[in-house]
Image (tube, grey):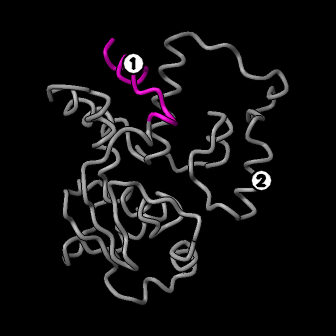
Amino acid sequence: MRYLGPKNKISRREGVDLGFKTPGTNSFNSLLKRLNVPPGQHKEKGRKKLSERGLQLREKQKLKFMFGITEKQLKNYLKKAIQKKGNTALYLSAYLESRLDNVIYRLGFAPTRAAARQLVTHGHILVNNKKLTIPSYQVKINDLISFTNEKITKIPYVEKNLNNKDLVIPLWLKRDGFLGQVISYPNQDDIIKQFNLRLIIEYYSR
């Protein structure tokens, strides 16, 4: 089941910004101020040293929360990645990055993955001029991603993000105005900067 509870509490527990809040908002600024303060009444005691298994679990949880996926979905992605010949971590990251909601987020059409997921489920996104409402849809090379109509681009959080001059779009994606395109396979560079995929794979290997 996808987590629907307090978002800042989860980020503080993991000790990292998991991308739940829109940058620049009061909630986001509040998170940054308290990011190193664990939640709970015993937060003043700090974080305990984790065992190897504990580190694996926390890394797995961070990945699930950041991409907004369920335990079942993550297991299925890993199962598919293991079945392929080659680098399991590379294939796992490719499955995660290729999710439609993640691509919407990476293209800058939405400020967070949760907002991107909402755009998809509400029927505001086209893939190759066909409406798709499945956030987990795996995009392919040459797929074209756009909005169903120009009115969607006037939604405040969408318009603000589209005008974000500091946005860095991954090399495997291209955006021209309100049109995005997948131009190559995603790599694991962006993910390995935030997660230790080896620990996650080891967690499920036991």
User: Which is more toward the observer, 194 or 61?
Assistant: 194
* Residue 109 in the image, given as x and y percentages of width and height: 44, 70
Amino acid type, label 2: Ser
Q: Residue at x 30, y 40 (%)?
A: 73
Q: Is residue 142 left or right of residue 29?
A: left
Quadrant in which the N terminus is drawn: top left
- Find out whether residue 203 is within the magenta segment: yes
User: Which is more toward the observer, 35 or 173?
Assistant: 173
* 195 w.r.t. 95: above or below: above
The answer to whether any part of residue 123 appears in the image is no
- Which residue is the site of mark 2? 30
- Identify the mark nearer the N-term, 2 or 1: 2
- Which residues are drawn in magenta? 192-206
Q: How many marks?
A: 2
* Residue 153 in the image, given as x and y percentages of width and height: 46, 83
- Find out whether residue 195 is within the magenta segment: yes
Quarter residue 169 falls in? bottom left
Q: Main secondary structure of the magenta part?
A: helix
Element class at badge 2: helix
Q: Residue at x 39, y 55 (%)?
A: 102
* Residue 145 in the image, given as x and y percentages of width and height: 29, 70
Q: Residue at x 73, y 41 (%)?
A: 35
Q: Residue furthest right?
A: 44
Name the mark on residue 73. Answer: none
Q: Residue at x 81, y 31 (%)?
A: 41
* Residue 7 in the image, given as x and y percentages of width and height: 61, 49
The answer to whether any part of residue 185 appears in the image is yes
